[in-house]
Amino acid sequence: MTIKIDNFEDHCTIKIDQDLTIYEVDEYRKQLLEKCDLNHSATVELSDEVELDTAGIQLLISLQKQLQATGGDLTVCTTSVQAINLFAVFNLSSQFKLTDRAF
């Protein structure tokens, strides 16, 4: 299981096409730490088919905190109704930059 990570001068893009659940987050976390330049801002694109659970949300919160510690921020791009609803249920919609536009 891999995610697509591209580093640019001041931005990291992360594309996740597979589930972001308790079963995958440890591997994703390892890939993010190895491949993503966390000294900048980042955009995570979740495909419409991605299943997201609380472990996936925790990974996104952790990534956001790491980026904010260095002056960056995190944008989450998704059109997945399930993901948008999960952000709303946990009252996180205002804490993340959510968009429906892909990068």
Image: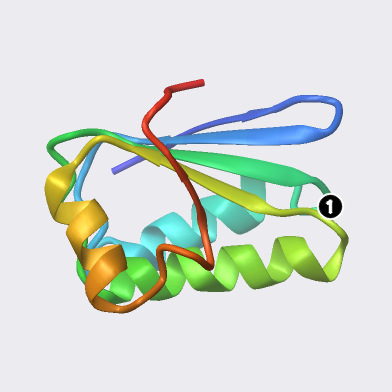
Depth order, front residue of 90/60: 90
Name the residue tied to disc 1: 39
Tell me what residue is drawn at x 44 percent, y 69 percent. Answer: 59
Tell me what residue is drawn at x 19 percent, y 60 percent. Answer: 85
Q: Is residue 75 above or below residue 5?
A: below
Q: Left or right? Give the position of 14 relative to 7.
A: left
**x%, y% of residue 25?**
34, 65
Q: Residue furthest front?
A: 94
Q: Quadrant of the N terminus?
A: top left
Q: Residues within 10 Å of mark 1 (few under 14, many from 20)?
A: some
Depth order, front residue of 65/101: 101
Q: Left or right? Give the position of 82 relative to 86.
A: left
Q: Left or right? Give the position of 7 relative to 44.
A: right
**x%, y% of residue 46?**
32, 40
**x%, y% of residue 33?**
63, 58
Question: What kind of residue is marked 1?
Answer: Asn
Tell me what residue is drawn at x 25 percent, y 35 percent. Answer: 79
